[in-house]
Structures are given as structure tokens and as C-alpha cells.
Image (cartoon, rainbow, N blue to C red):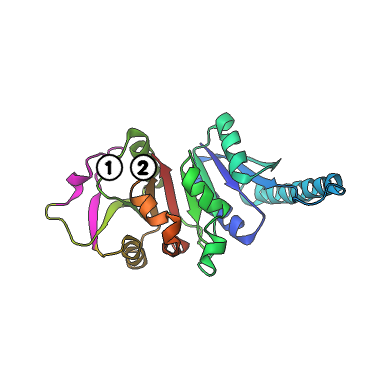
Amino acid sequence: MKILVPTDFSPNSRTALEYALCLFGSHNPEVVILNTWQIPHTGTGMLVSIEDLLRADAEKSMHELVAGLAISAQNITNIRGEVKEGALNDVIRTMNRKEQFDYVIMGTNGADDLHKKIIGSNTANAMRSTKVPLIIIPEGTECRQPKRIALATDFQPLNANATNHIGRFAQLTMAAFEAVHVNEKVASGSNKSDLGFQLGGLSPEVVHIVSDNISSGLDNYLNNGDIDLLIMVRRDYGLFERIFHKSVSRTLAMHTKTPLLVIPE
């Protein structure tokens, strides 16, 4: 297993890294920690010295981070740091073509000033473009193995890539697994057979939430259901886009509380 954890050396990115080590540590994964930097778009006179300073500062911080992990995470034997120039999501795509990551794990901030901190951020951009399962870790998430995970479903068929990823993650975590469906009313006869797929041998029970707003319904479900992680499948047009479209960006507040696994279809 190989996982990528982008970092800007902030407390939030450290939370995401600790969660990654906690979640997958028993599988002894290869952990790649990535920091990216870019030269500010200013005048040209100081660019060479600025580039040297940015690179040197990033490499120093990365060395300290990896050295500390080598001491504290002794059960994980393959940890390396990478410092690269460029936009984060561009670098992730380039690296993934070569390394084929199983998961990318990123942190995000709280809901205050939601548009500034989430919409347009690296994490939001990654949600909309990732080719790799992406785990988003909210600020303040405690490092613990998930006991209950849920899949948000609209009962639309999923392709083999998505179902394989969902089944594999459920088996890796060994958590109790259920599916949640939000609708204005409960459709008669809707149950686990309506999912129309088997998730790696799993056949989850379906929890129906009655709400005229999908995001509010999911938010209430997560707050009251003791769910440790929510899985969503990213489609161009479907449940994910209805929730995470920029025009309804206020609904992103829901995932500042519960880790979110975004799986590309």
C-alpha cells in the first residue's frame, strides 16, 4: 500500500498525517509526504534568491518532520519526504502517474470563513479532480480507527472501480458499514437490495433520512449517528455534484466534522 500525504507543515496537515498513520499503520504502508512551493508572481529581480529560500525552507521543514516520524512511528518503516515546485494538484497528478498511490490524505480547516478556507482551496480542488481515493481530515480529528463508516447513496448504479474501492476500504478498516439515503420522503420498498451492487462482498443496511435538503440531512445523520467516516462517490452529475457545487458552497460545512472519503468513479 502506498499513500500520499500533502503537507504545508501546519497543525491541520499534521492532523491529517497522524490520521493516515493511525488508519493504515498496521498495514505498514509506504508513506510519501509531499510539500509543494511556488515562486510568487512578482518582479524578476529577486526570483533566484526567493526560489533558493523557498526550497531551502521547505527541505529543512520536511527533514525535521520525517526525522521526527522515524522516531515516533517506528511500526512504519518506509516514510519519505518530497519537496517539489509547482501547484499542489498538478504535482499530485504527475507523481501519481509514476507511483500509483492507493490513497491521498489531506487536511482542511473549520467552517468559519467557509468560502475562503474550503472553496477554491487545494482540498476542494482535489475533491473535484482526483483520480485517487481522497480522504479529507477535518481540523481537530482524533487519531483512531473508525468503528462505523457510511456510504452516501442515491441508489444510482456504481461502476466496478468505485465498488472495488469501497469494498476494499471497508475490509481494511474492519468497521461496521452502512449506507445512507437522503430524500424528501422514504420510497416504499427501498432497502439494501436497491443499491444494485455488492461492495466487495458487503451488503450494507440502508439508513433512510427524510429531509428536503441533502446536505442538511447528511449533516444531521453524521451528528447523531456516531459515524466515524463518510464515503462519497464523485460523479460529474450526481449526488456529489449536487452537494459540492460552488453555487451551494455553504453545504460544505458538513464535512468539517467528519472525515470524508471521496472515491472517483
Split into 4 quadrants, where in the image is the C terminus? Answer: top left
Tell me where the magenta segment starts and ends, as one range.
190-209
Tell me residue 231's x, y (percent): 38, 50
Tell me residue 17's x, y (percent): 58, 52
The residue where tag 1 is placed is 202
Tell me residue 223's x, y (percent): 36, 67
**Which quarter of the figure has residue 146?**
bottom left
Q: Which amino acid lies under the numbered mark 2 shown in the image of this protein?
A: Ile
- Report the label total: 2
- Local packing at callout 2 (Cα closer than 10 Å; few below 14, some 14-19, many 20+) is many
From where the camera sits, is residue 109 visible?
no
Q: Which amino acid lies under the numbered mark 1 shown in the image of this protein?
A: Leu
Pick out the residue farthest to the top: 98
The residue where tag 2 is placed is 166
Q: Does the magenta stretch include residue 54?
A: no
Marker disc for residue 124: none
Task: Using the image as rendered, state which of residue 241 and residue 16 is in the foreground.
Answer: 241
**Which quarter of the figure has residue 86?**
top right
Q: Residue at x 36, y 36 (%)?
A: 164
Q: Of callouts 1 and 2, which one flags the residue occurring earlier in the amino acid sequence?
A: 2
Left or right: 44 as drawn, with respect to 171: right
Left or right: 121 as drawn, with respect to 254: right
- Mark nearer the viewer, 1 or 2: 2
Tag 1 and tag 2, C-beta contact below 8 Å: yes
Q: Is residue 196 above or below residue 144?
A: above
Q: Which residue is drawn at 59% across and 40% down?
A: 92
Q: Residue at x 32, y 35 (%)?
A: 159
Measure the C-alpha gap from mark 1 to mark 2. 9 Å
Q: Is residue 203 magenta?
A: yes
